[in-house]
Amino acid sequence: MKDLRACLPRTWYAFLARHPRPRPIQVLAARPILEGKAVLLASATASGKTEAYVAPLVELWLEDMRAGVTRILVVSPTRALVNDLARRLETPLRRCGVRAQRRTGDHPRPLEGSRAGILLTTPESLDSLLSRHARNLGAVRAVVLDELHVLEGNARGDQLRVLLERLERVVQALGGPAPQRLAATATLGRASEVAQQFLGAGAVLAQIESPRDIQMHIRTVETPGLLQSSLLQACLELSARKVLAFVPSRADAEDLAVVLAGRPPFHSAVKVHHGSLSRQEREHVEQTLLRAEAALCLTTPTLEVGIDVGDVDLVALLGPPPDVTSFLQRIGRGNRRSGACQVLALARSVGEAARFAHLAECARAGRLLPQVRPFRSSVLVQQAFSLLFQNPRRFVSGAALSGRLPPGLVRRFGPERCDELLAHLCDEEWLVPVATGRFGPSPRLLQFFERGKIHHNLDAEGSEEDRVEVVDEQTGRLLGHVYRDAQGNLPEEISLGGHRRRIVADHGRQIRSRATGKGRAEFRSRGSAEVSAELAADLARYLGVDPRHLPTVRKDGSLLVGHFLGSARARLLREALRDAVGTGAGAGPFLAWLPISADWPGNLDTASLRRLLASRRRRLGRSLGAGPWASALPGDWLLEDLEAMADPQGTAQSLAGRVLTPAEPHLAEILVGLLPSWKSKSAL
């Protein structure tokens, strides 16, 4: 401890003195950070990672930051995490005489004149800053990627990798050194590989292995009524006063809140947290939970990472998370100041109970089995647009685009290939040629830029034209938003924030509502979360499935076939099954189904699956996660990405030689319980 205090003479008391002794990650990470090295900090939730990187960085740049120079940039995955980080850092930074500023869609205040030493933002807002106000980032000397596991492996993470290179080019062009890169994560598979991708070769891995005691209470409840009563009864039995319950969807959160409100032991202290609530409503719920001694919060993954809601006694999982990382993140929200995680797992079938037990086994053994995704070419479309507007002369070239890519991608996307992409974007009426090898914005792209729609790689749940704000009739308070259906209609009653509300006035983009005792939750589906091929195969091992067999079950006129391919490969299998036997066939991450009268197709070889993927590439682009800009890609570029995602060769090899075999009774019951919830079960 004395050595660490000596390393941090000016920031020790502000950041670390309130604890009896520094946390292991703080001791391990301080020296390489102070030496200016790239560092990935990996340790459990609530282990002190934030202080572990902020204290050394402020120590390094304290004089400049006190003078109002922005030296540290922190990129968090969500606006809610930015807000939470700003709240937690406010006091220690004030003690150091340093100001922090948030820059997000919720807090768009200009950077000029802010005199902030540390800037907190999201990938999308960083993209906007680089495109519109790049010079304001010229003084940055360190960039931190907070909660990196949330971004790694998806299109936003691919975007962030390019943004880091663009930031480095801006800082160096203005006479500064390449900013030091840091990242923090609680759960991350392939840590060394990910560190190299985001932080560069030679990055230091500061990792603390701290396995927690997972005390799982698995209960199978096959009806909504049993689920509700089991949740409340378990809270009483386990003496849980503050409970965080993760539910599959926003509609489930709203519907359960209405049913549970007023019932003991929580009575009126039943809260809801999800992305369709307004920022003010979400922050109100977060502050209520932080202060409350007893409360039940029904939440989607919006509270899965980072945000401090106090010491939670019990984490309830209403249905299994999609992967081990999400499982660890969710259970890590509970008992953060003790060694044991109290987890109530409510399964709607024996299949879900088996999944819970398997996830717990993987978590205890440290087997994360993550989904490995290639860099998405569609991100280059978005980055080409953003880079174009960063240029005061408003043009982009293939050489400029290729030159802003991470070193590992330049070979794949060299200047000539990037020129090919830009020429195609002219054909798609996004760009126009302005000189040889130079491309400017089309009127269509100018409109997107003016509306701020070119800075993201998020798949939208609905168009902005369909989005409607919900306002309380009496107070005028913004509660959140819902979406109109395909015909532009809304139901007469809705559920939002745990309360039933009747629509009393429809003003187009805004509706006014009043609380009532009726209604239902209405939200657009955001699609199902991905199950990796590795996790699905490991579940088959856990269940004792013979690798030579495809176990089958006859159920309600269908033949269920356990393939355990994972989500991406299953989407390709689904297309093959529907081609062979019609729309009555389908596939989820673990099972396929087809009419009993139909035959299992015999043409599931690599060549056939590749041809199928090529013929459906536009339709499969979104479901396979190719990114929101994938429709603008040349067809062969999109196919290249989809082949890496769906893996026709791996799919064919996984199915080759396996024989359809009736499952033993116990396995048969589990297989039926592994059917996707939309096909086999009612809502919670």
Image (tube, rainbow, N blue to C red):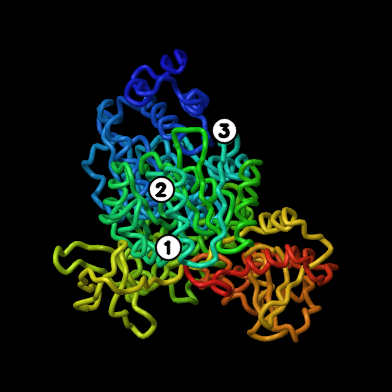
Q: Residue at x 36, y 56 (%)?
A: 273
Of mark 2 and mark 3, the one earlier in the sequence is 3
Q: Residue at x 29, y 34 (%)?
A: 69
Q: CA distance from mark 2 to mark 3?
A: 23 Å
Of mark 2 and mark 1, the one earlier in the sequence is 2
- What residue does disc 2 label? 243
Q: Residue at x 32, y 59 (%)?
A: 261
Image side of residue 421 versus residue 452, left or right: right
Q: Nearer the viewer, residue 580 or 68?
A: 580
In the structure shown, which secondary structural element does the residue marked by tag 1 occupy? Answer: helix
Q: CA distance from mark 1 to mark 3?
A: 43 Å
Q: In the rendered view, would you say 83 is above or below 14?
A: below
> Percent from the top left, x then y, of residue 71?
35, 35
Density class for disc 2 (Cα within 10 Å; few <14, some 14-19, many ≥20) is many
- What residue does disc 1 label? 385
Q: Nearer the viewer, mark 2 or mark 3?
A: 2
In the structure shown, which secondary structural element does the residue marked by tag 3 occupy? Answer: loop
In the structure shown, which secondary structural element does the residue marked by tag 2 occupy? Answer: strand
Q: Residue furthest left?
A: 474
- What residue does disc 3 label? 210
Residue 419 visible? The answer is no
Q: Are marks 2 and 3 in contact (CB under 8 Å)?
A: no
Density class for disc 3 (Cα within 10 Å; few <14, some 14-19, many ≥20) is few
Q: Nearer the viewer, residue 325 or 242?
A: 242
Q: Are marks 2 and 1 in contact (CB under 8 Å)?
A: no
Q: Give the residue type that dot 3 points to.
A: Ser
Q: CA distance from mark 2 to mark 1?
A: 45 Å
